[in-house]
Each structure stands twice: as C-alpha cells, then as structure tokens.
Image (tube, helix red, strand yellow):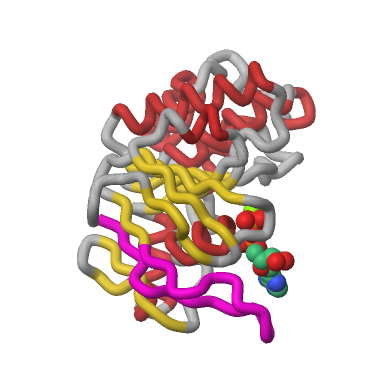
Amino acid sequence: MLQALNVSKSFGDTPVLRDVSVCVGAGEFACVVGRSGSGKSTLLNVLSSLLRPDQGRVLYREREVSAMGEGELNALRHGDFSMIFQLHHLLPYLTALENVMLPYMNSLRPVSGETRDKARECLARVGLAGKEERLPGKLSGGEQQRVAIARALVKSPSVLFADEPTGSLDKKNGDAVIELLRDVHRDGVAVVMVTHDLGYAKLADRTVVMEDGQVVEDGGPGC
Ligand SMILES: Nc1ncnc2c1ncn2[C@@H]1O[C@H](COP(=O)(O)OP(=O)(O)O)[C@@H](O)[C@H]1O
Ligand SMILES: [Mg+2]
C-alpha cells in the first residue's frame, strides 16, 4: 500500500537516507528501529509526505506521493495519513476536546455537532471520557499523548505514523499508548512506528532496522 523505492535524502552535504526501499502493507503494523541519528525520523517523514526525497519515489496506493503538488499532499495529510510524535504538540490554550477537533477547525464556520460527537467518541476510545474540557496542562503526560492519538484518529486515517510515541512516557503510560496503537491496528489501520524499545518492536508485523541511513534488516513479508 505504501512504498519507498530507492529513496535518498541529504541535509546539506550529509546523506541521511541512502537508497532506502521499504514497504508497508494495508493494515500492517510496521516498526522502524535503529540508533539515534540512523535516519528513522527522516524515513518516517519521507513516507508520510512531510519531506520530499532527493532521489527515489514514494508510492501510496499506486499514486506517486513524491511527485504530488501541495493540493494533493494536503488532501493526503488531512485524509488518509495521520501523525503522532514523541511530544504531543497539543495547543495549551485549547481543551482536550478542542484539540481533537483541531483538524476540522477553521475560522470560517463552526464545528458541526457531528464532528463534536466524533471527537468525543475518539476521546472515549483512548480512555478520556469525562476529561473533554480539561486543558492539556491539567492532564498527565500519558493522557496528553492519548489526546494526540484521539486527534490522529478523528479523521479515520488509513495510515497512522508515530515517531517515538512512548519516548517521553514512563513504562506504564508507554504500554498504554502501545496497547492503543495495537487496537487501532486491529481495526485495520496501518501503523508505522519509530521506536527505541525493542520489546515494543517485537509486537509488530514488520520490523525494519536502520543503520547509518540504510535499511539493514527488514523482517516483514516481501513487498
Ligand atoms: N532538518 C535537518 N537538517 C539537517 N540535518 C538533519 C535534519 N534532520 C535530521 N538531520 C540529521 O540527519 C541524521 C538522521 O536524523 P533522524 O532521521 O532524525 O535520525 P533518528 O530519527 O534515527 O534519530 C542526523 O544526523 C540528524 O542530525
Ligand atoms: Mg528520530
């Protein structure tokens, strides 16, 4: 469903991805592991269309993401693709519910009742029913990350990208986040997660190991 084919990317003179090819099947749970600086985040950003590769192609459902214009890319980022990060990137002055509705908010029209209901449902799904009106500062780190997951789910994505989503959480909260991601995966969403935690990586269908800008191991089924 999602493929990077012979992708290279440099920042200045420094090659960060060197001829990388990986693929993710529909509904697959894929993990990317490797040392700090090995290019994991860059690979995730290329796959999720946030970064354009210098060379090579990224394909999603047979469409070439790496050749799309801004309009098409925006449609993809606001539709099929969703993203969570190590830090949750919630807006501190919006409530949990408002943060989840953020992808639907614009200054031209109010959020519909239907969207509000969907956002409430997503918060309930991540175990935050009753905390809709809290500001992020009044939630624990684990709860904040769960709000970010609810926000990522509100548009019913086909692929959820997660860059070290447990990186700033203790074990208990990290486990809860992984359990949620597995639950999302069981619902048919493809999950592509960068993690340092080999225990979590073991739970994936496919583990891609990166070293120095290259994929040195791909434990998944063939592309
Ligand atoms: N925007 C950028 N500008 C310059 N160098 C970058 C940028 N992003 C990442 N790098 C460099 O690319 C290398 C790989 O980074 P990254 O993909 O973030 O690795 P990882 O996620 O595995 O830690 C690192 O050496 C990093 O310093
Ligand atoms: Mg990283």
Classify residue 142 by image quadrant. top right
Q: Residue furthest bottom?
A: 13
Asked whether, in this view, residue 123 is left or right of residue 191, the answer is right
Task: List x then y, in percent, for residue 43.
Answer: 51, 62
Task: List x then y, in percent, for residue 80.
Answer: 34, 53
Task: List x then y, in percent, for residue 117.
Answer: 41, 28
Magenta portion: prevailing SS class: strand
Q: Where the N terminus falls, by quadrant?
A: bottom left
Q: Residue at x 32, y 57 (%)?
A: 23
Does the image show residue 104? no
Q: Which residues are magenta?
A: 1-21
Q: Is residue 59 magenta?
A: no
Q: Where the C terminus falls, by quadrant?
A: bottom left
Asked whether, in this view, residue 124 is left or right of residue 99, the answer is left
Query: Where 25 sits versus 175, above or below?
Result: below
Q: Is residue 19 magenta?
A: yes
Q: Residue at x 31, y 27 (%)?
A: 186
Q: Residue at x 54, y 46 (%)?
A: 33
User: Is residue 92 or residue 217 the one in the foreground?
Assistant: 217
Q: Residue furthest right?
A: 137
Task: List x then y, in percent, for residue 184.
Answer: 38, 30
